[in-house]
Image (cartoon, coloured by chain):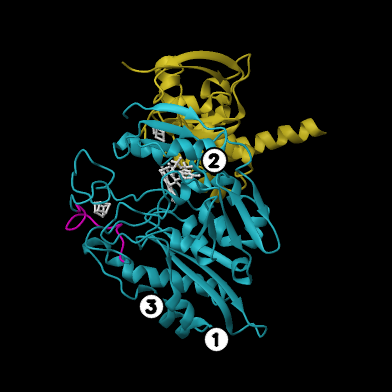
Chain colours: A yellow, B cyan
Amino acid sequence: MPRTIHLTLDINGKAHPLDVEPRVTLLDALREHLDLTGTKKGCDQGQCGACTCHVDGERVLSCLTLAAQVEGRQVTTIEGIAGDDGTLHAVQKAFLEHDAFQCGYCTPGQIMSAVACIREGHAGSDAEIREYMSGNLCRCGAYNSIVAAVRDAATTIAAGQKAEAA
Amino acid sequence: MRDFSYTRATTIEDARQAALQAGSAILAGGTTLLDLAKCGVNEPDELIDISHIRGLDGISVGESEASIGALAKMSAVADHPLILKVYPAVAQSLSLAASQQLRNMATIGGNLLQRTRCPYFRDPATFSACNKREPGSGCSALGGVTRNHAVLGTSESCIATYPGDLAVALVAFDAVVDLGSRSVPVEEFFLEPGDRPERETVIAPGEVIIGISIPASAAARNSTYLKVRDRQSYEFAAASVAVGLELEADGRIVKDVRIALGGVATKPWRARAVEQALVGKALTEEVILSAARLSMEGAVAHGGNHYKIELAPRVVARALRTLGGLA
Ligand SMILES: Cc1cc2nc3c(=O)[nH]c(=O)nc-3n(C[C@H](O)[C@H](O)[C@H](O)COP(=O)(O)OP(=O)(O)OC[C@H]3O[C@@H](n4cnc5c(N)ncnc54)[C@H](O)[C@@H]3O)c2cc1C
Ligand code: SF4
Ligand code: FES
Ligand code: FES
């Protein structure tokens, strides 16, 4: 008999009740149990970054995180970063503008990683972006456009913050 | 991944008690444990999640030493302004490891206890022989693909490389692991495989890492971590070195130097012979090259990893040139 545990996960600001086996990862909970399939499964072993989500605002790999570990923490997925009215996040816009994908499979993970990378202050130069985005692989090799999109979004976000402060 | 039960520990004492049970395992960031559970290398019955215990993630840098709690995240230590200033090699060993996502998850305690990346060890479904996994079963790496296996500290039973970066920097600067009831120098914490490769550290069942401390030194302050690998980022070391250097007041003669190697040995490897060959000498290209060669004293290659015997001394020499202002 599989043992299930009852969890309530805070995902994109909403409480999601869930009955799962303790071994279920956050990635599988999102995709298989909560119908949040924006987060992708690539390697399922921590090696590709496709499953990147935010936990308490920090980027992590949902394939190496148990759903049970994040009860009581705030989870954000790709479905939760656009505005309530559907306005795209600056990073999403930049990925569209720069055509920063081909097949798109790595893209949700790239975008979640980039949003955090900019927030951390690790998007200061192309070299820094390459280093701090290295946990997100792209089999289509869209790297140059991804770097350009992150650089552009970082500039847009910094300008927005400046305008707000003024 | 086989199913297990999941419990959250609220105190260290809880964790110790629970960890005494056969079949139980401590879960911190989970980046080693869950990965190996998926590979079928670990099959725990019960996970004890210590990541919600409060007060174990502190980072403090004082006059005489730095203390880092076992639950401090790799990313927090890598970006800590005082660690960057007083122990640059330690900060770099972390920021050059894994990816930012993994560094946000992984803890300092778990980092020390990460397991080898030996592909035979990680694949029990295909390779039944692995002395580290199954004592006495043999070693599938011998005669196999050994590009990333160790050349130092190996035995007939096991040639697996210790893959971590942080522990290399810690060994160079005489850091100590705090296990609560006892403290052990990081260098003695790790064991060579000998004929018992399943035993990697001195940690006993029920023991929990509380934190680490690193003594302050002029060498630690003037230090660097150089990591050479098959791709530029997000990769384990082919060869790496933590070097710390203190010169005499004349700015020429070596007063104190610390050198430890990663990616080439079965445990984080302090290169004392190199240190001894440098102390009291002025750093010239000749002195550096002949000392760096000593880092491979006793090295044994197994096929595909022969290049490490050439590579490691060059990595040592390059780091010494950088720190000594010769680069
Ligand atoms: C794709 C990938 C790339 C990587 N690249 C690098 C790299 O380049 N360099 C590098 O150094 N590392 C690298 N790592 C390894 C990574 O740094 C480790 O997995 C991580 O540091 C482990 O920490 P954790 O908190 O996640 O440990 P966990 O997985 O939670 O635990 C690891 C082990 O330690 C035990 N444990 C944890 N905490 C304690 C404690 N306080 N007391 C006693 N026992 C404890 C657990 O029971 C388990 O056996 C990589 C990992 C992955 C997946
Ligand atoms: S080198 Fe060690 S870990 Fe790898 S297969 Fe041989 S015994 Fe196992
Ligand atoms: S699916 Fe999580 S890192 Fe690849
Ligand atoms: S766009 Fe195809 S993997 Fe990145």
Badge 1 element: loop
Q: Amino acid at mark 2?
A: Asn
On screen, residue B194 versus residue B236, left or right, reads left
Q: Is residue B140 magenta?
A: yes
Residues behind callouts 3 and 2 on a single chain: yes
Mark 2 → mark 1, Cα distance in angstroms: 42 Å
Mark 3 → mark 2, Cα distance in angstroms: 37 Å
Is residue A8 visible in the rendered image? The answer is: yes
- Mark 3: few, some, or many residues within 10 Å (few <14, many ≥20)? some
Is residue B28 visible in the rendered image? The answer is: no
Give me the residue at 54% from left, 35% from top. Answer: A59
Q: Chain of mark 2?
A: B
**Nearer-N-terminus badge (3/2):** 2
Magenta range = B139-151
Q: Chain of mark 3?
A: B
Q: Amino acid at mark 1?
A: Gly
Badge 3 element: helix
- Mark 1: few, some, or many residues within 10 Å (few <14, many ≥20)? some
- Dominant secondary structure (helix, strand or loop) of the stretch shown in magenta: loop
Q: Which residue is mark 1?
A: B280
Q: Are marks 3 and 1 in contact (CB under 8 Å)?
A: no
| A120 or B148, nearer to the observer | B148
Q: Which residue is mark 3?
A: B293
Badge 2 element: helix
| B281 or A116, nearer to the observer | B281
**Nearer-N-terminus badge (3/1):** 1
Give me the residue at 43% from left, 80% from top. Answer: B291
Question: Ligand 4 is located in which of the four quadrants?
Answer: top left
Residue B138 is marked as none
Residue B104 is marked as 2
Give me the residue at 43% from left, 20% from top. Answer: A29
Coordinates of residue B268 in the picture (x, y in percent):
42, 61
